[in-house]
Image (tube, rainbow, N blue to C red):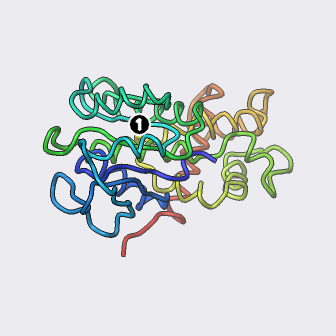
Amino acid sequence: MIVRRIISGGQSGVERAALDLAIQLGIAHGGWVAPGRLVDDGLLPDHYRLKEMAFADGPVSADPNIEMADGVLLMARGALTGESAAVHAQAQARQRPCLALDLDRYTRFQSSLLINSWLKSRRVEILFITGPREQDQPSIYRDTMECFRAAWWTLMMVEPGEIASAPGAVGAQPRSLEEAVERLQRELPLKDKVTIANMRADEITGLMPTLGRYIQKHFGIWEGNPDLTRSCILAADRRHLADEDIAALIIEHLVRELRRTHTLRLI
């Protein structure tokens, strides 16, 4: 299992975004907060399930959160300074895996892939997310939300081998674009179908390293599936499609169908 709990100190900005994302995405959350639930913009509301420290002789509540975490994700715009730099040094001193992500250096999609790769390689289950407060870097709350949400969508996608072992993931290779889409709809777990249906357009490309590779391998595209290839070429109105293009077209049609049936609607 990867990332079963997100923790932070509850400060505005990056830490508050981490908690709100955990709540929105259905991930357990927690962490340690200063006595009296005092944070930089007032008192931390009770719906955030953080524990109060008995005392705090330093800023924020980094020490116990670092001790609790399997890994530390620092998100900021530009070089780390102040408390963020101190947390980075403390994490290194305690030999905790730490990723310091400069959101000015990478696009949101690039950042999401870096986070995804780091979480998987380090097998982080309890993740401490921290960084600048909103007053120090305006809009860092929004940037953190958008970046980590994109990373989470791709992180939660099943690996190629996992789909093949799922119930119902057997049978002849699909012979048409429609059959390929129907088969994916049968095989994908519900959580992945909901995830895909609610991705933004700029997040869809993140499916290629996982779902795209699965399609190419298990739908016979690498070995040659002339019927499926011909069907995709006709649908795309092209004379030729590379293997990656065929997978991308199948994903495009899958997304279209799932948005019709699995989009979350706010009431």
Q: For this rendering, which residue is in front, 196 or 175?
A: 196
Q: Give the answer, above or below, for where 59 lies relative to 97.
A: below
Q: Is residue 54 left or right of residue 224?
A: left
Q: Quadrant of residue 232?
A: top right
Q: Please give the name of the residue rendered at 55% of the width and 58% of the height, measured from the top-left corner.
A: 258
Q: Secondary structure at mark 1?
A: strand
Spot occupied by residue 85 in the image (x, y as percentages of width and height):
28, 28
Total labels drawn: 1
Q: Quadrant of residue 82?
A: top left
Q: Please give the name of the residue rendered at 41% of the width and 45% of the height, measured from the top-left corner.
A: 65
Q: Which residue is mark 1?
A: 73
Q: Quadrant of residue 92?
A: top left
Q: For this rendering, which residue is in front, 160 or 31?
A: 31
Outermost residue toward the right?
Answer: 171
Quarter holding the C terminus? bottom left
Label 1 Cα crowd, 10 Å radius (few <14 / some 14-19 / many 20+):
many
Spot occupied by residue 231 in the image (x, y as percentages of width and height):
68, 41
Q: Please give the name of the residue rendered at 37% of the width and 71% of the height, measured from the top-left corner.
A: 266
Spot occupied by residue 34 in the image (x, y as percentages of width and height):
27, 54
Q: For this rendering, which residue is in front, 182 or 33?
A: 33
Amino acid residing under circle 1:
Leu
